[in-house]
Amino acid sequence: MANIQSLRGMNDILGSDSELFTYFVENASRIAKNYGFTYIETPILEETALFKRSVGESSDIVNKEMYQFIDKGENDVCLRPEGTAGVVRSFVENKFDRAGGTYRWYYYGPMFRYERPQKGRLREFHQFGCEVFGVSSVYEDANIIMMIKDILDFFKIGFKLELNSLGDQNCMPAYREKLVNYLTDIKEDLCEDCNRRIETNPIRVLDCKNENCQKLLYNAPKITNNLCEKCDTDFEKLKEILDFNDVEYEINTNLVRGLDYYSQTAFEFTSNEIGAQSAIAGGGRYDRLVEFLGGRVTPGIGFAIGIERLLELVKMQEDEKDVIYLGALCEDALNILTKIASKKRKDSKTFIEYSVRGFGKHFNLAEKQGANIVALIGENEIKDGTIFIKDLKTKEDKTIKLEDF
Ligand SMILES: [Zn+2]
Ligand SMILES: [Zn+2]
């Protein structure tokens, strides 16, 4: 019988990868909590309609990449392709939009996209993200950006921050019209995707990856030159706060999101360390998304970090804490070791070897477990109430009173 394997594009996370994974999630969570965020967990499976409404029917994600199926109760359901939609659904469902106030939530977990498998693309991948509701102040936009910077700094990841403003209901429609006029004139020279988008989603033409298109777009009208007074003042203020806090950024007027509920601040953190200019985190304001999903108008802003991609860059900081290996030199020592272990485990990683061995064998096993302290008890130690300790790094050993260990 053939062995069963994991599904295409879906990986186990284990060994050193899982250590890195938890190291990232624990520290990113800690930083988010320091910024006042609390954890939210939403279901992995949601109604397909949720993503059609929030991610948008015209997007590639909804068109081609949804992990969608009909369940046994005839419900049209989908494994979540991203995290924001479920969080907003929960926000509205729990009537926080009616209660008012400020909500800061972070989440992490698996996301699914049914993509054609290719190198580096997973069908199950993980994101860490944050969403804020009820804050319209541009200081929150700066707060979010500085939090991502803190996370990347903690993991010693070099990055470039790109920034744009997408305007709002007030100034975006007029800009869109200007852009469509410009694009219609150069239509013949733009690629097929761009031509389709002029009709469906003209703003997305700006981030076409085709080099020829980018050349032609060089003189296209820029959103940042077409902002209304409020959007312009907010954008200037955001830049001022970032400057004041020594956060470096570049303005990229081609950094866009294709959906109507996005407004004003949009940002992306990229890194050169994994291939050419890969995005590692992105987000922005979505002041109309709650309304799009049936709630009361509530300002919102959020971001997501792709964990797998980031882990290629995370260097684990050397853990200074002792890892202790406890071994028995005689059968009677084992019970004593269980007692020592339960004390030591209050703040150190501690292993017990259950088989009685000699010194040399214990040292070998301890090294394999990644321990730096070996502590052994035999008949003599039991008699004297002592324990034998060896530091595997300095190679020093000594026998000390058990209560001093
Ligand atoms: Zn194009
Ligand atoms: Zn505006």
Image (spheres, helix red, strand yellow):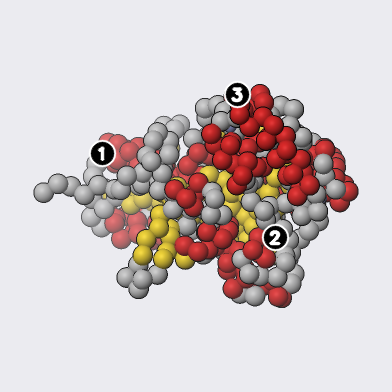
Q: Does 165 sit above or below residue 77?
A: above
Kindly identify the residue that appears in the image at 76 percent across and 40 percent down: 178
Outermost residue on the left side: it is 1
Query: Few, some or many C-alpha atoms within 10 Å of disc 3 (few <14, some 14-19, many ≥20)?
Result: few
Q: Position of residue 115 (x, y in %)?
A: 41, 44
**Cβ of disc 3 within 8 Å of ligand 1?**
yes
Left or right: 24 as drawn, with respect to 103: left
Residue in the foreground of this view, choosing between 229 and 131: 229
Of helix, strand and loop, which one carries label 1? Answer: helix
Q: Nearer the viewer, mark 3 or mark 1?
A: 3
Alpha-carbon span between mark 3 and mark 2: 34 Å
- The residue wearing badge 1 is 361
- Quadrant in which ligand 1 is drawn: top right
As shown in the figure, which amino acid type bears the numbered disc 1?
A: Lys
- Determine the secondary structure under disc 2: loop
- The residue under label 2 is 288
Which dot marks residue 212?
3
354 horizontally vs 154: left or right: left
Quarter residue 189 falls in: top right
Q: Image quarter for residue 77?
A: bottom left
Residue nearest the observer in this picture, 370 or 31 = 31
Picture quarter containing residue 157?
top right
> Looking at the image, which residue is at 47% across and 62% down?
48
Disc 1 packing (10 Å; few <14; some 14–19; many ≥20): few
